[in-house]
Amino acid sequence: MATGKKKYYVMKVGNKVHVFTGRTPRQAALKAATRGFKDIRLRERGRRNKDKTYSIHVFKGDVKVVDAPANRPSWLPAKVKKPIVKKVGVERVKKL
């Protein structure tokens, strides 16, 4: 496993702000999908491009409930959530 720096990705839904962590936007999107978000738009916190725009990573998310692996620990339930995300694209915005 590659060791990388943890990044913070911000997702605004209405007036609420959710922060997800991960090395990549996809990893943060998987966490958002696990929590039930379908339309995921993530902005890396504290990061602005050279042309003073922000990159918004856009994903479509879903979650499936699947059987846990046969070698699961005793505390893990028989059914677990499996997040699924598909990257739609990257948008560039001038101001937030």
Image: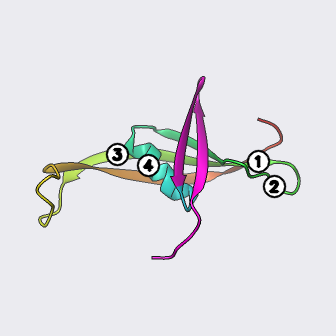
Amino acid at pointer 4: Lys
The residue mark sitting in front, 3 or 1, is 1
Asked whether, in this view, residue 73 is left or right of residue 24, the answer is left
Cα separation, mark 1 vs mark 2, equals 6 Å
How many C-alpha atoms fall within 10 Å of the one at disc 4: few (<14), some, or many (≥20)? some
Cα separation, mark 3 vs mark 1, equals 28 Å
Q: Which mark is residue 31?
A: 4
Asked whether, in this view, residue 82 is left or right of residue 1, the answer is left
Which residue is at a point 60% across and 33% down the rendered structure image?
A: 12
Which residue is at a point 74% across and 52% down the rendered structure image?
A: 47
The residue beneath circle 1 is 54
Which element is circle 4 on? helix
Mark 1 or mark 3, which is nearer the start of the sequence? 1
Question: Is mark 1 in CB contact (under 8 Å) with mark 2?
Answer: yes
The residue beneath circle 2 is 49
Is residue 7 in the magenta section? Answer: yes
Which residue is at a point 50% across and 45% down the rendered structure image?
A: 60
Q: In this rendering, is residue 86 above or below 71?
A: above
Amino acid at pointer 1: Tyr
What range of the chain is rendered magenta? 1-21
The residue beneath circle 3 is 63
Q: Quadrant of the C terminus?
A: top right
Q: In which quarter of the image is the N terminus?
A: bottom left
Mark 4 or mark 2, which is nearer the start of the sequence? 4
21 or 96: nearer the viewer: 21
